[in-house]
Structure formats: structure tokens, C-alpha cells
Image: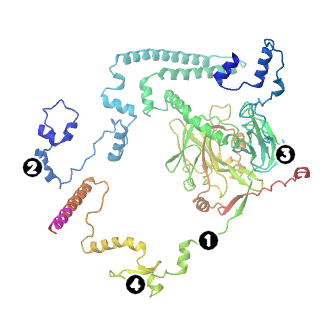
Amino acid sequence: MAFEMRARPLAKCIKCTSHRSLTLPIRSFTSAARLALDVDTGATETQAPPPSTPKKRDPNTVTTAHGERQLLRNQRLMPIGSRRRRAAMQQSGLPFSELPYQCFQEAREYLREDRAEKLEAIRIERERIEKLKQAKVSETEQSRKEIRLQSMQRQLEELKILADINDPLVKKTFEDGKGDMNKPIYRYLADRKWRSYKRRVLIQRITQMNVVPDVLPSIEPVVSTSLSFAGRKVAHGEFVDSLISAQAPKLNIQCYDKGKRLVTIAVINPDVPDVSKDGFGYRCHFLACNIEISPTDTQVNLSKLVEDKQVVLPWLPAYAQKGLPYQRMSVVILNQSGPGETETRPIDVTTIQASDKKRDGFILRSFVNRMKLTPVGVDLFRTKWDDGTAEVMQNAGIPGWDVEFRAKRIEPLPYQRKDGERYR
Amino acid sequence: MVLIAHHTGLAKAPSMATLAILSSALKDLRISQQSLPAISHMSKRNASHQAQGRANKAKDGPGKRLGAKKTGGEYVVPGNIIFKQRGTLWFPGDNCFMGRDHTIHAGAPGYVTYYKDPARHPDRKYIGIVFEKGHSLPQPAHAVRRRKLGMLAYQTPPPTQPIDQVFDALGPTPSISQLSPVAVKKNSRGSTLALRPGYQYRQANWEIGREAEKREAAMQEQGKTTRMFPVFKPKNRFAAWRKSAARISKNAETRARNRMGKAKK
């Protein structure tokens, strides 16, 4: 050891000086191999190291971002459920509700009692509604009875949500994305989630891009929409390539109140140039009625609707001629019920006026008033001239693909010569 | 005493005014009443008003010519200056925009309107432009906005012939050998050398770039290769290590051989 210390000053620098008796693998001036390991190295040099096989990962229990990436890359699998759920799966095989924490179980007991209370309240409310329905009232009292019934119905719906809102299993199911939209509690949670962020973004887009005064006087969206072209989702107000928007999109309309309803979908472009008027006009790119949606039945493929019962105007590719500013394509969902009506009614497509079957100059405001519709949802995408627009217009047989718009020259004001006093 | 203190302490001549005061104070004590020359006629007033620095309050600078350049109802064209200001006394409303120094410019031809829009902001003042004399601002909240296109449509000329079609029309491109027999040579490998700028007979750069590939292809046909090592794979660290080890050992060998050669000499 002492020899080594003298021979190798580096050895002095080793941090742990207390373990002097420890023989460190430092090679002194010896010709023979010190360790068996050293002998082998010559032989192993020429051989390749064994190929590293990627670790098999379980899509049910992978929790780290790295693990998820590896799973996707090596096994081509998507992780299942939320990361929280996967962490829970990893830790124990016990079901979530049977976790052995005293506080947790006591809290569950407390919630169970609360739920029983709420269920009792629901039963009483139902009885009261029934009793009121049976009750005979005079003609003058009839409207008051209707209002009373409506408010009691609202109260009942509220109680249904209150019964389940604190249930940890409900929360877990919703977060895992497995909520049943037929049940009021999951509809309520989904609505709350949508309103917390996505709806605000939508409102901001339609007000900043002036869809609201230009297409409709006002709109209060109650259904969420998401637009997808060729399988790719489009954010509200995003620019879509004209080659992509040549095909009709798919629309996902999620409503948050129970029951089926019939809706009309209109795609309106409020930025159609009108040179003679020196202003802008409207064009309807798509119009279809009698589309049935429900909380669980949300997908609408605009290209696969029934020709003579639903479609009034089939899809026209979105385009903006060269030189024009971008054009807004607003997708409006209209409930087929008037302001006071609760039930939607079908529209006979054949009876729709000839003026409504014309694409150019289609004014949605008057259509909504005439057909007695209520706007419930809105979506938006934008289009501008790009490399594919001319081709798209030629394929669709739209004239004007070779027209270019240029700014009109505005005559400058005549130069006002100031009075001679100033120039002396 | 005061005088002495002045003389010794500060070593500075007392001012004429001080001397005059002192001489009048000592006059009564003086025994001989003979008159001394009056100091008062010797006194001199020096400037005591500071001329530099912040002695006086800063006066108003030159006027900056701020304010309204166009009044309400006046006709403007895009780019006209409507209001010059420091800060935002006025905000740009419809068809107006704000310049770098908060100047309000016209963005469309029309008539200037000064207005308030409580729906947009409770206490901001706006300058906007309306297209017609009778119109007013702000526009009603739920009505369609008044907008102007301000553009004209022009027919674009028919597209020119694509470049590849133009070349097709010209016929096949003449090769180097066809260009001039004098300006072409051949090297030992048989590749064509053209007279290139700088009076050099050489291959074009792109041909030089392809040369190694060509030779490799020719060798491959014979079942051989020009490569010293198999095709480089950037992720194969083991192969890279082997290669570098081989290179290092080869270099060491060469060096040793050279050293031996020198020693012999």
C-alpha cells in the first residue's frame, strides 16, 4: 500500500482516508494481471455487447412520463386510464372503495348517510310533484301551477346531483373518462368542466372575431362542439388548409341536458366580398336539419346525412380568393324549438323556401326567426388563400379562382397651401 | 478679534463691506477725530446670483404642437393624423389605429367621430371613423358591423408555362462533349474533364462529389468494397469504439516504426 501511495500520488486524493486497510484496485508497476477481470477484457474486446431488450411495461401500472413514452415506443401501447388510477393500481390490488384507511372509511360512512338523506328528499319531492299534477285547479290558477311544477322539477334535478356529487367513486369514474352521460351527475360534472375553461375560450373567440354581431345578434352556447377535418381536431377559430377543408368535417356535439332533440346545423361565411356594394355579404356553405343528438349520441358526420330528409345545402369547400383577408367559417347549432318550447319539432326539408336554398346572400338571422329556432352552440374555423385554394375551387367548379383582389387606391387629400404670411 | 480670526483662520481678505461696518463701529472709540478715507466709495458689488445649474425653475420649453389635427365630422383618408398626444388621452376606435407615440391615425376613408363607448370601457374616450356623414358611433351592440371591403377584383393573367415544359420544348440538353471538342479532356480514369473557369481542366464539383459513390458501386459489382469500415451507424457505439481503438493502435504502430527508422539513421 505504501508503495502504491508513493508510486501514484493520485491515490492520496481518494476521499475516504480512514479505510486504509482496504485494497483499492490501483495498478502498481506489475507486469502480471492483478484481477481476473483484466484478463478477460482482451477476449471480450472483439465481441459485441448483448443487444439490450427493452423492458416490458404494463399499460395498467406505468406512471412516469418516461415509462409512458417507452411503452408507446417499444410496445406500441397507450397507457390505460389516468396516471392517478395507474398509480393506485400499482400500489395495491384492493378496490378503491376498500382502501384500509380509517379516516377514509369514516368519511365514506358520513357521505353514505348524507346520500340517504338526499334520496329521501328526492322521494318526497317526487311525491309532491305527483300530488300537484293530480290536483285540479281553476283556469286562472293553471299557469301558476305550470310554473310551480317547473320549479319543483328543477329542484328535483338539483337533488339528484347533490346525492352523488360527493361520492369519491363518481369522481374517480368521471376523471377516468368513464362517466355515463345518461346519468345527471356525470352530465353535470362534464358541463362544469366544459364551462370552467373551454367554453370561456369559445366565447372569447366568437366575440373577438365578431361572430356574434356579424352572424347572430347574440348566442349563449349550452352544447359543446368540436370540429375535426380528416380525423384531426380543429381548435375554435383555427386556420384550416383549403385542401383539408374541401371535405366535409365531422362535428361532435355534446349536450348536457337529458333527452333527444333535433338540431339544425348551418355553416355561414360572413366575409364574402361584394365589390359592387364595397362591403361584405354572406354565404351558406352547409345547411342540414333534423339531426338527432342526445348526451350519448354526439357524433355528426356532415358528409353522411340523409340527402332529402336532412341536407338542404351540401358541403361547399371553404375558400377565400387571393388577396382577401381571412374568412370566418362559423358553424352554428340551432335547436329546432322556439323560445318557449321544450320539445323540438322536425322540419320538412322540402318546404324550406327557395330563398333559403340559395347559398349566396343567406342571412342566418332571418332564417332563425322564420323557422323559429334557438341557437344553442357555435364553432368557428378560418380560411385564407393558400397554395391549394385554386385547385379546390377548380375541382368544386367555383368560378373566380383566377381573380385577385387588390386594395383600392384612395385619393390623397389635396394639399392645402397655408396663407403667405407663414412663408415670409 | 473678528478681524484677526478672519485673517488667521481663513487667510482671506475681508470684503469691503465688512471693513466699512467695522470702521463705523470703531469710529466712536477712536481718540483722534481725523477723518480716514471713506471706505464706502471704494466698495464694489460683485455678481451674487447663481447663473448655472438649477438656480432658477425650468421654464416652459418649446410647444410640442399636440392636440386635435382633425375635428369631428372632417373627412380623412387612411394614414391621416387625427390627434397628437402624450399618453393615451384618446383611444383608437372603429377604423382608427394608434401610432408609435400614441398618435391616432385614420385607418379608412370617412368622417372623424369623437365618442365614448361605455360597453367597451366605462371611461375611455375614442376616436373613430364613420363611412357616411349621418352615421354615429358606437355601433349598436347586436347589429351587424358596418364594414367596407376597400378592394377591387382583378383577373390574373393566365399562368405561364411551367419550367420543365419550357425545357422539354427546347429539346434535350446538349452534353459537355457536344459543346466543343476542344474544351474537353479525359483523365486517367476515363472521366471527362471540361475547361472550367480559371482555365482548369477538371470535373465539375457535383461530379467530384459523386465520384466516390460511383467507385463504390463499381467495386460492389465485383463483390468488393472501397470502404475501410462498414457503413457508419451513428448510434452503434460499440462499432465506433472498435474503430477508434483500431485507429489508435494503427497510429501507435506507425509512430513506433518511424521512431525505429530514425534510430537506425
For the point 67% across and 38% down, the residue is: A373
Q: Chain under label 3?
A: B
Give the residue number, with chain letter if any, for mark 1.
Answer: B160
Residue A19 position (above or below residue A9): above
Outermost residue to the bottom = B181
Q: Chain under label 2?
A: A
Asked whether the beta carbons under mark 3 and mark 2 sit within 8 Å of each other, the answer is no
How many neighbours does mark 2 have within 10 angstroms: few (below 14), some (14-19), or many (20 or more)?
few
Cα–Cα span, label 1 and label 3: 47 Å
Asked whether the beta carbons under mark 2 and mark 4 sit within 8 Å of each other, the answer is no
**B262 falls in the magenta region:** yes
Which mark is drawn over residue A31?
Answer: 2
Q: Chain under label 1?
A: B
For the point 20% across and 37% down, the residue is: A12
Outermost residue to the left = A32
SS of the residue under disc 4: strand
How many neighbours does mark 4 have within 10 angstroms: few (below 14), some (14-19), or many (20 or more)?
some
Give the residue number, with chain letter if any, for mark 4.
Answer: B185
Quadrant in the picture for the N terminus of chain A: top left
Mark 2 or 4, which is nearer the eye?
2
Cα–Cα span, label 2 and label 1: 82 Å
Q: Chain under label 4?
A: B
**A117 falls in the magenta region:** no
Mark 1 or 4, which is nearer the eye?
4
Query: Which residues fall within the magenta stretch?
Result: B255-263
Work out whether residue A146 can be spotted.
Answer: no
SS of the residue under disc 2: loop
Give the residue number, with chain letter if any, for mark 3.
Answer: B74
Residue type at mark 4: give it. Lys
Query: In the image, are marks 2 and 1 on the same chain?
Result: no
